[in-house]
Image: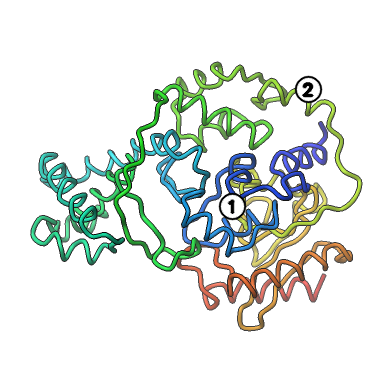
Amino acid sequence: MDSATQRAWSWHKQGLDGTLAGATAAEVLSAAGWARSIGGANPYLTLFARAGIRREQADADMAALRIHELPTARGCTYVLGADDFPWALSLGQGAAEATVKVLDKLGVDRSEVKALEAQTLEVLRSAGQALDPKQLKDQLGDAVRSLGEEGKKKGASTTLPTVLGLLQADGRIRRVPSNGRLDQQRYAYTAWGLPAASESPEEARAKLMEKYLGWTGGATLKQTQWFTAFTVAQTKAALAAVGAVEREGLWMLPSDVDAASAFTAPKEEQIQLLAGTDALFLLRRNAADHFAEEDKDRHLLSAKLALQADLPDHPIVDRGRIIGLWQYDPGAERIAYWTFGAPTEAVMQRIHEVEDFIREDLGDFRSFSLDSPSSRQKQIDAINAARSTS
């Protein structure tokens, strides 16, 4: 494949070509990849771009546990569908256990951790409603130990966060957004009781590898290891378990090898405005591959865009090729945009559609929990300036 066809192939595998139109939120996440959350609006735009799903429906799906935000690969939180809950959750248990080692170094015995797990679970089961960390701490009283300045330096001011992480990692509790929305990071916790995964650790790793290669359409060994956090031995075992084959440096599912060979890039424009953390880029952290050769020297605020591991702004994309950048300006209630060439009618139509979606459904478009209109004003100004001089 040449680079343009490779970009379009990834675009197709991500369902950004209209093939997921009409799908449910769970179906989108299963087919295109789990949506990284980090308190930003990416999960909403992920669903809107691929299937036209609005925030009200996404929030209803989350409330009904058809989708949920859970810690999984690398211990990171993603929004995923119910069919993946148990086995995906098992992949994040190692990260939760690692925090226990921090407590151990601070003089907290594992028996104390286990006792607090039991007490926390009992409080949540008795509460009849979700409780935020402060409410939990108040009810648990002296059972929660302060770890002082040394603990703060190690990111563990008390024993409660570690315990909440452990309980969440095996499905005994789940955290729920305080206002029912995914684009913030204020949470409460409620008892859950998710059945344990039926898959062994090896089977869960193979399942993730199969999903991952299907979502990406092919990835390098290094890319698979970044996303999964598997060791080299675990990665090779998982690749073998799913029968993956290597083609031109990319590991692919057998079913995708022939499909990719027969694939041709669409001739007509297919415009999407995506989040910088969209699965199209984040799964392989290969945003540079999505710039055409003539755009690889583009700069914004003195940064060369194609050299950034992660995009500094949200991309405007056509069949996998990044053709511009955007940010939402809530003060003006409009999208600030810069296209590398003159924007076509299709580009302007999609900008207005996404602008309406953000204004009506979200009110703002935050990249992550601490993002704010004031923190991104410099980027908005730079995009506006680039647009006026291009």
The image quarter in which residue 300 lies: bottom right
Please say if 13 is above or below 390. above
Q: Residue at x 47, y 27 (%)?
A: 205
Q: In this view of the protein, which residue sits in the foreground, 348 or 27?
A: 27
* Residue type of the residue flagged with mark 2: Asp
Q: Position of residue 191 (x, y in %)?
A: 29, 51
Q: Position of residue 161 (x, y in %)?
A: 25, 54
Q: Which residue is mark 2?
A: 258
* Residue type of the residue flagged with mark 1: Asp
Q: Give the SS element for disc 1.
A: loop
Q: Which residue is mark 1?
A: 310
Residue placed furthest toward the left: 142
Residue placed furthest toward the right: 267
Disc 2 crowd rating (10 Å Cα; few below 14, some 14-19, many 20+) is few
Return the disc, 2 or 1, that comes first in the chain's sequence. Answer: 2
Q: Position of residue 181 (x, y in %)?
A: 48, 64
Position of residue 51 in the picture relative to residue 70 (left or right): right
Q: In this view of the protein, which residue sits in the foreground, 381 or 102?
A: 102
Q: Quadrant of the C terminus?
A: bottom right
Position of residue 245 in the picture relative to residue 389 (left or right): left
Q: Residue at x 45, y 27 (%)?
A: 204
The image quarter in which residue 175 lies: bottom left
Q: Position of residue 324 (x, y in %)?
A: 75, 61
Q: Are marks 2 and 1 in contact (CB under 8 Å)?
A: no
Q: Residue at x 24, y 52 (%)?
A: 154
Please say if 78 is above or below 138. above
